[in-house]
Image (tube, rainbow, N blue to C red):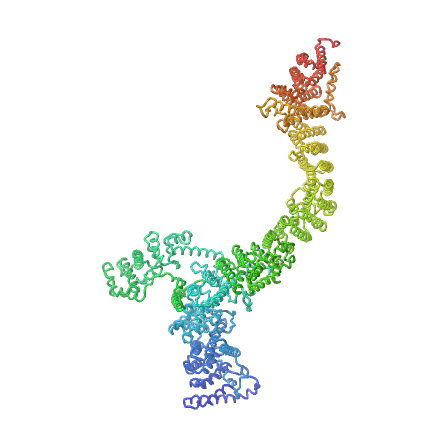
Amino acid sequence: MFLSKALEKILEEKDVRRSQHLQLKKACESALEEIRNDSKNLSDQTIRGSSSTLPLPKSMSSFGGSERYFLPFELALQSKQPRFAILALDCLQKLIAYGHFSGNKVDATNSSRKLIDRLVEVVCECLNNGRAEDSVQLQIIKLLLTIIASHNVEVHGESLLLIIRTCFNIHLFSREKVTQETASGSLVQMISRILARMEEQPEVPRTEALRARSVSQLDSQRGTIDENHINHSSSAVHLNGNSDAIHPVNPEVAELLEAMITAVSNEVDGPSVDDQRSLTSVPASPVVRHREGSVDSVSLRSSGSNEEAAAEDNSTNKKHCTILEKDAYNVFRSLCKLSMKPCKEPPDVRALDYRSKTLSLKLIHSMLQNAGPVFRSHPMFIDAIKKYLCVSLSKNGVSSAPEVFRLSLSIFVELLAKFKLHLKMQIEVFFRDIFLNILESPSTSFANKWTLVEALTKICSDAQCVVDLYVNYDCDMTAANLFARIVGDLTKIAQGVVLIDPAVSPQQAQRMRIKGYQCVVSVLNCMVEWSRDLYVNTHSTVKNELDGSSVGEEPSTGPPMSRNSSSPSFDVPKKAVSTLDSPTHLEERKLQKEIIEQGIDIFNKKPKKGLQFLHEQGLVGATPWETAMFLMQEERLDKTQMGDFLSENDPYARDIMHAYVDQMDFSGRDIVHALRTFLDGFRLPGEAQKIDRLMEKFASRYCENNPHLGIFASADTAYVLAYSIIMLTTDLHSPQVKTKMTREQYIKMNRGINDQKDLPEDYLTKIYNEISEHEIKMKTAPPPKLKNQQNSAINPKQRKHIYNMEMVQVAQAAKVMMENVSHVQASFTSARHSEHVRPMFKICWTPFLAAFSLGLQDSDDPEINQFCLEGFRYAIRIACVFHMAMERDAYVQALSRFTLLTANSPLSDMKAKNVDTIRTLVMVAQTDGNYLEHCWLEILKCISQLELAQLIGSSGKSKFGGSQMMLRGKSSMNVVSDSFTIFDHEIWKGKLDQQRLVSLQESIEEARSQSMVVAVDRIFTTSIALDGDAIVHFVSALCHVSMEELHSAHPRMFSLQKIVDVSYYNMDRIRLQWSRIWQVLGEHFNQVGCKFSEEIACFAIDSLRQLSMKFLEKGEFAHFRFQKDFLRPFEYIMKTNRSPVIRDMIIHCVTQMVSSKPGNIKSGWKNIFSVLHHAAADNDADLVDLAFSTTSKIITQYFNLYFTNIVESFQDSVKCLAEFACNVNFPDISMEAIRLVRVCARYVDERPQVFREHALDFEEHSDKDERVWVKGWFPILLGLSVVVSRCKLDVRTRALTVLFEIIKTFGHSFHPEWWKDLFQVLFRLFDDLKLPQNHMEKAEWMTTTCSHALFSIVDVMTQYFDILGPFLLDDVYSQLRWCITQDNEQLARSGTNCLENLVLTSGHKFDTEVWKKTCTTLGTALRNTLPTELMDFVPRDPVAAHSSDDAQLDGFSQQLMDHQENHRIDHEEIRRTKRRQSHPRLSQQDNPVLARAVVKCTVQLELIQAAENIVFFPATCRKEDVELQAIAESGRPVLPSVPVTVRDTDSPVPTGMYPNMSSEQLFELVASLLDIHNFCKSFNITEDTRARTSETAVTNPSKMNEPVLLKQEIHSFSCALRILFRMYDDSSRKDACSTSEEMLLSLNRDAIGYACSLPSELYRGAWKSVLILILLKIIRLDDERFRRHAAVLYHNVCLLLTITQQTEVKNLMRWFFARCGETFQIISPQHA
């Protein structure tokens, strides 16, 4: 066994025989003897119990048996002999490693400690204050490390610290590199083991009993255990001394030692120490497996005296901690104190103080790296970090030694990662006052700045840390804006605007810029990671590319990043999660903070304005007390400005100052302490009056708080004393005062100030001493920015001196602040919400954009370019995720600009970075397409130009292929050649050197690479993955780019082809999305198909055809309209584009769709018929013929098969046929189209149920039968009416015939409401505004179509009068009245004839009410046609000669007579025509009044005749006139007639409507006729009219003295007389007999008298027929009636006898007188 072997080796040494080693020799011999005896006694048991070739069982070995042999080794270590020490140390190490020595027994020499403590003390003393040999030192290290690592040995308290201190000293004092590194490595392992034990201790309740368990209790327990194994301890000893194979070493200890030695050897043999090391180059410690997982890093503090340690031990014992926790705490505190020890400046790397500091910092860093949950959460360690480590870092963080500075930063990074929840105030001090000041200082060395930027790189790689900085500081009302400041500094570093040591090489400056860009990109990456939950990426593979590795870096091989961090991070305790982590709340606080900061900035310049601003914003109360509270609490206010403001004499400032002082409490304080407190908040102004005001209020407040002080007689004493203290401070501590005030002088100065008495000298002496020792320091303004001192730093020495001075100030201020905040408990909010990224990005997006833009623009460094592009990607991602449109647009536009594709730069400027920018832009399109919105336009513009660049790069070889879709012909060659001249000219002119030319070719080839083409195509192929809104933005932008391509000087169709592809890919989207897409695409196809060349339009139409065929394959459900929307471009292009080629192509496309997919077409039929409708009006015979053949095929074939699908578009089909019928160029097609309309009517009649069942969404509640009319009959009838209105005679006659044929044939199925609509359509045929304006065409229309239509309407009314009469007769009468009263003569006469025919054919069906309406209509028409214009007629030129007047009136008279006599024989017409030619006169067009009067006169004659025909039947009155004329001419006697009765209406002999009319209606008609008669008579007998009539003889002798309204006058009177005589003779109308008689008596008397008064024979000749009628009717009366009439008329007849020369009248007068003689018995009948 090695124990006996070691003892034997000691005895073999020759030095052991010396007298000073005699005790050692005896101890070794005694121990060997005991070993042999124990081995002999147990040999039999061992042989019987087990094989000698196998190790003893655990139960047969003892961990404490070897402790009996400790004495020889102790003496060997105390002998100071290296050989003895090495053997002893080696043996002890093996005993402990194999578990044979635990040392848990109580030390025999000192019962208060254990044997292991004695062993540690002896081993450590063996070092001999560092004078031991290196071999001994290595053995010491090995043994001590084994003690710490062993599971069987427990070392605590002083022994543990002694071990650490010993290894620490070995590192410091050893001269061998191996020994130093071994010591430092062992320390790292020891500390790791200490922490591991603390973290791995069992989770038992930490009761007071467990915590108070003493070491003696543990020893007794251990001793009891060891006693049980003493008898078996000899089993560990083997006589042959070789027990290594039998007792294996603790594998963990062996592994630890081996790893340490290997690491040390590698480090010694490896790179030199001078090599640049990274921030994390601290010696690595083994990963310790804790209960709650592994963790990362933290930081440390410094040391103190033994008295402090004892005091802290007492305080620590009060805390609830275990002995393992206390051990770790002691080690940690000791290392912190060691790190706080100062070292000389400039630092010497070989000096002990420097090496001690660096080693302590390394060990602290190691402890923080291995800190587990207990270390991170226990209040004891948190308190130690605050009290010691943070203070240490505040000193070491400003060290000029690079290694110390690096280690301090490493520790700070660990603190920030693991302890930030407890160090909110400390972290702010570190950043604000130390590290960022160092970073911003122009005097900082490059090495320190580089180290600091590396630290920031690590910090910025932790998303949780970055967001926490913003949440806890930038959103804190009183904290510094750390995140904004860090971002600003990093962007300045990236842009190269931060001042660096002039001695730095350009390569180093470039490295600094690269590192700055890396930090900036890390910040953005953290934001992306933090908001990852909000990001939705449909392209998972592209997302993996984006998130997998950073540009310019190797792909990460570590664990995947968590949501909260880009590197593995610990789990924040749930209790640390603050409820204040609300994005909305934090944004409000951030906004308030910005306002407060703005107000503070104003205050620091103009205090009153600043306070006014804060009052207006509601952030500071308006009362003096609230304002004073703000001034007292706000640390960011300028203390100088604040002192000046408080001391002003203004009432506003004075009130605030009083409130400010009143808020202070000076109770129980001496005046110096109170004055220090008073002056702590502001800087005392320099003006004496201002100081006086402040001191006066201070004295008042001090006396108020200390009324029982008993020193001051009044406040005046305190006031004067305070003033003297200020003066004393200035005198003693001002460098400008050379002669200082003595104590006696100060006492003398204050004599008599206490109400004429003196203050106690001891009191004043105490004040003097305190002020002389501790100056009352005034608040000072912050030191000037370091950049202001850069001009004086001419050489490195001066720069270093300035830097050291600055760092001293920073260290002093930081130490004070750190000590002040060490006891402050500030809550730290652990961010959790993703929404925090939005306000963070709002802060940094502008400087980031500037940095990235500058990097891409000015630098060609690949790393910088890659970082910039990656930053663009991350920034765009964040802006997209949070829908920040302005920020997103800015980044995308900037990125597109750097592609050089949309800029005006020539292609020769293309570089590798531009190609990379294109790739980045394409990647952005692939990954963030759902968020880009309007930015798609910039991206697609670049892609369009990229295609052109690819085409150029291919030297124009592929002009028309694939994605390089361009117009064929000269334009494509022009595009290529023009683009080549951009850089080809430079090549031949020598502007491009060979290297640049090669680079350009490489860039072009890279842009044309297959990967680039595939990436671009992927944007379009994966557009199907875009969401509904994104795809709309995408296609909108694509259409815009396509339009720009087509509008260019050399049009291209790349984007147009992509539009077709995108449409094809996305056609399977849900209909709601597709309709929005097609709304954009359809409009684009409309524009392309109409506004560009035929080749482009043909491509667009053919693409539409292909898409339509695919779309129609999907079919369509009922009530959907997607097909209609999809096919609308065909309709629009057909309507707008007049190119025959395009129109023909569209018709062929429609024909193909109809032929191939008729069953799938539903709502699309509407577009198809619309296209055919536009084609129907074309002049191209082939086009019209093809369109009509397609239409005919649809009507004749597909109507029968798919009528249900087409019924919705039935109206459009009829409209289409009507348009074909109206095409005047193809009459055969017109006739055939009208025939097809008749076929359509048959479909409506046969399939009304289809119309009833088909309803649109808004028609669901409509009447089903109404749908038949609206969708079926009405379009047909309306279409035919349109044909009638628009076409020429033959076509419209055919259309009119078919129209009324349909009405008569199918009218039995029409509802009453339908008839109303129908008649509205029919009445439109007579709309004067729609009639032809050409006079000849109008005359033809009136003569043919109007007449035909009117009689057809009458026929329809007659046929369906029973249905139409009750509700349509009023409309018909109204329309007729309107026609009759129009200025158009033909229309008026047609209306008159229509009215007459209607009454005559249907009058027997009229009831009383209808007859009343009929008579009213007729009477109204008669009155409305009175030519009243003639009464007010004035010649056009009254001053002109009478010949002009005559011409006008003669013209009217002649026209009127011509119209009235148009029914006479032809020779009369010829005569008048010749007369017109010989005597020209004014035409109707020359005077509209005359034209209107002529029409009215003519129509009125027609109306009078119509009235007469209605009452007596046509030609009845004419026959009667002939008979009466014959009687009058013959001279035969006239016999009285027998009274008649009304004939039966069923009599076959026509009698007119007289029997159906009531007497009242007849009287009404008579009254209308007499109105006409009286008007015409009054006009004819007017003197002026008679005079003008007489003057017409000059030009028209044949018409001399013939009144112009004579026919109306006579005809109306004759008609009225006939009606009255008929009623007078009608025995069935006895009620009207008396009335009619009275009227006849009056009318006859007046008529005969008027005839006698006529001045003209011609006039009297015209009245002959009236006289004959009167006389014959009177003569034929019976005797009684004749007697009454003769008595009235006799006088006028006698007068007539003297005037008339007319034979017929004379004959009748003869018989009148004869009848009078007979009736009145004047003569006998036989003489009559």
Snapshot quadrant of residue 407: bottom left
All told, the count of numbered labels is: 0
Where residue 1658 sits: x, y (%)? Answer: 67, 18
Occupied quadrant, residue 107: bottom left
Along the line of sight, the residue nearer the viewer: 900 or 1262: 900
Residue situated furthest front in the rendering: 989
Q: Is residue 1623 above or below residue 745?
A: above
Query: In this orientation, which residue lies closer to the viewer: 1163 or 1347?
Result: 1347
Left or right? Give the position of 751 relative to 176: left
Q: As rendered, which of 993 and 1151 lies closer to the eye?
A: 993
Give the quadrant of residue 21: bottom left
**Residue 1689, image x and y in percent?**
67, 14
Q: Identify the image quadrant of the C terminus.
A: top right
Q: Position of residue 1666 (x, y in %)?
A: 69, 18
- Which residue is situated farthest in the right direction here? 1548
Using the rendered image of the protein, determine whether residue 383 is visible from the camera's viewpoint.
no
Q: Nearer the viewer, residue 1114 or 232?
A: 1114
The reply to whether residue 326 is visible in this rendering is: yes
Rendered location of residue 334, percent (x, y): 42, 73
